Image (tube, rainbow, N blue to C red):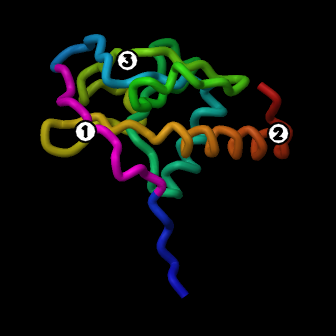
Amino acid sequence: MTTEVPQYRRPDAPAAPPAAPDATPVTTYDTVTAATRHGLETVDILRLRRACGSVRQSADGASIAFLVPAGTALGWHLPGTTCTPGATLPPPTDPRWIMPPSGPGPLARPTDSWVLRSALCEAASTLTAGGLGPF
């Protein structure tokens, strides 16, 4: 019996560009935003699946933003979330990063959009069952 958690990544995912030294718009990512409680529950689910890419919190702390591959915004329709084209990446040392860019460079790694959608739905179900939803 194997106990390894499967990796939910597409093998043809585009390589991430190097992170900018200061907060600059980047068009190689889109941003999926969810309310803080919903987003943090989703981060936990993705981390358990070993499928969590770079994630940051908004400046006001009201939402969580997941980096996803560019083009995701064209087909994103999930109530309770928004997906906007492009992303603004603060430096890797910014304290708003929940899952900061890492590796040589450091590089921001996007979360697969289908895996993120699944985790967001699972998180919504979990929060609703616990009496903390709908949001």
Work out whether mark 1 precedes mark 3 in sequence or the reverse, and give the earlier one.
1
The residue labelled by disc 1 is 15
What is the C-alpha distance between the residues marked 1 and 3? Answer: 16 Å
> Which quarter shows the N terminus?
bottom right
x and y percentages locating residue 114 in the rendered image: 56, 41
Foreground label between 1 and 3: 1
Which residue appears at 44% of the width and 40% of the height?
111
Residue kind at label 3, given as amino acid type = Ala
Left of 69 or right of it: where is 72?
right
Choose top left, top right, bottom left or bottom right for residue 56: top left
The residue labelled by disc 3 is 87
Residue kind at label 2, given as amino acid type = Thr
Which residue appears at 37% of the width and 17% of the height?
87
Residue kind at label 1, given as amino acid type = Ala
x and y percentages locating residue 126 in the rendered image: 76, 46
Specify the segment rendered in magenta. Answer: 8-20
For label 1, the crowd category at 10 Å Cα-Cα, with few meaning under 14, some 14 to 19 and many 20 or more, is few
> Which quarter shows the C terminus?
top right
Left of 134 or right of it: where is 56?
left
Work out whether mark 1 precedes mark 2 in sequence or the reverse, and give the earlier one.
1
The residue labelled by disc 2 is 128
